[in-house]
Image (tube, rainbow, N blue to C red):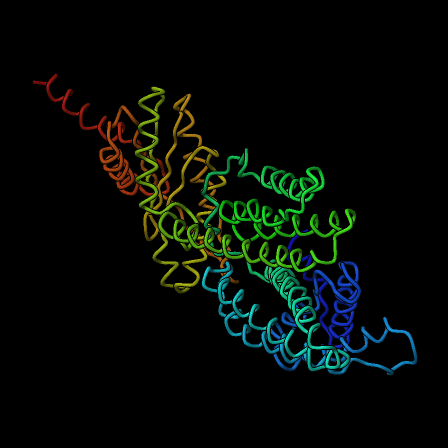
Amino acid sequence: MQQDGLKTFLPRTLLAKTAALFLCYWLAWNGAALFEVKPHVSALYLSAGLTTAVGMVGGWRHLPAAFLAICVVRQLDMPGPLLEGIDWGGALRQVLVYGGCGVLLRRRWQAMPARLTLADALHFVLLAFAATSVSAAATLFIPPFDTLPANELGAVFLSFWGGDFAGLLLGLPAIVLGWNRLHRSPGKGGTDADAPTAPIHGLRSPAGLIGLALGVSLLSLLLPEITQSEAKLGILVLFPVLLAGLMRGVLMGYLVAALVCAIQILAGRLLGLPVDGVLDLQLVLAMSAATALLAGAAHDDKHFEWQNANFDLLTGLANRHRFQDQLEHELMRAHRSAQPLALMYIDLDGFKAVNDRLGHHAGDLLLQQVAGRLRECVRETDTVARLGGDEFAIILPDLKELAIIDRIGHKLLARLEQPFELDGSTARISASIGVALWPRDGGTSTELVHHADRAMYEAKRLGRNRLAHRARIETAPDTAVALQRART
């Protein structure tokens, strides 16, 4: 389903939003009961993450509704008359601490790019640690816990802190990732569009990472049972989570973290988790989520830097730097395989007039659409690059037959000649394309670029909207010289 289709399911009216909020709290409350590993102690208190998300997405004005939702949902699960025994203090504590935490995150979240940076991830993890510590400490002053003996306060503090910490670190990222997925607008150029599209196999593939997570999770649970030891091996699940984050980014890291957490909870319950292992379980859940966020954000930061260094931010095509590297690489392959390689140099005809008439924004839209049409006309093995302005280049390796060049070239000319729709305006352009062929027109990248550029200017001289080969440029003068010699 497309993102626009998913958006239709989002509540739009105030009543629908309120009902959705109550439903979310009901699900979070029952989810906490599902993960209960000790009477009144949940390994994963998802309501903490939900309240933080309410403050972060909606701000202070949504927190009163969250307070009412918490009170009502808890009351529905309690026996006795309606409105009797409502946990006003617990609801207020949750809204003030976690709602306030969300409000503190709101400005950073609104300014955050589509990806989660390492600085943002670290800020969130540290704030979550501080908020859960404050919340757990405040719990000790709220009935009925304010009457507990002093020797029990530490256990109560740790149980609430662990469940809230795990719920916040696992719950809030799930909400934010889903929210960004629904609301993000399509990227301008899609910087991954020209990246290698070959499927990933082995450990780096989603299947490989999930398989590793399953194996390590089950091993950490079954090995102590098999060896009859009291060793706690839950920390081993951080290994596949770390690998997933470092290799594939935040989203894959989080999915693997959620998987190992689900296995730890469900398998742990089936195996009869001892009471003294509750905090260990909570810490495994929390640290799995923190590891996924930090390692994944570090990967995404590096990937973003690589994209900026190799791809044009406007169109998503390879930039001049990547084009030069790819051309050198393809020439080395051509030497080994002895297969011809062609280089197309493309300059748009009439782009400046469109830019002057409709403005730079329309010009940017035009370049993005041109990039999309160029990709449509080439093979998967070809490289399309934007060299700057309205100049593009295409590397055509592994030419089994030279007719492929003219076939792709004329397809490009026909496609670029079709009208472009630019925010209510229609524009028409064409293209002049110059072609140089290895090894016929040059043996180095510099020679190929030079001759393809000359051929492109020859196409413009001949009337634009055409394809010119470097060899054909040389033919006319050579023929004229030969005729002159024959006459003399």
In the image, taking residue 36 as reference, residue 411 lies left or right, namely left
Residue at x-position 67% and y-position 55%: 281
Q: Nearer the viewer, residue 360 or 288?
A: 288
On screen, residue 424 above or below 298: below
In the image, taking residue 156 as reference, residue 383 lies left or right, namely left
On screen, residue 255 above or below 139: above
Q: Residue 140, position in %: x, y?
A: 68, 78
The answer, for residue 198, to whether it is visible in the render is yes
Residue at x-position 60% and y-position 39%: 212
Q: Residue 339, position in %: x, y?
A: 36, 21
- Locate residue 314: give its quadrant: bottom left
In the image, taking residue 129 as reference, residue 277 lies left or right, namely right
Q: Residue 296, position in %: x, y?
A: 51, 53
Q: Nearer the viewer, residue 358 or 131?
A: 131
* Quadrant of the snapshot with the C terminus: top left
Q: Nearer the viewer, residue 242 or 162?
A: 162
Q: Nearer the viewer, residue 334 or 435?
A: 334
- Locate residue 29: give its quadrant: bottom right
The answer, for residue 65, to whether it is visible in the render is no
Q: How many marks?
A: 0
Q: Residue 150, position in %: x, y?
A: 69, 77
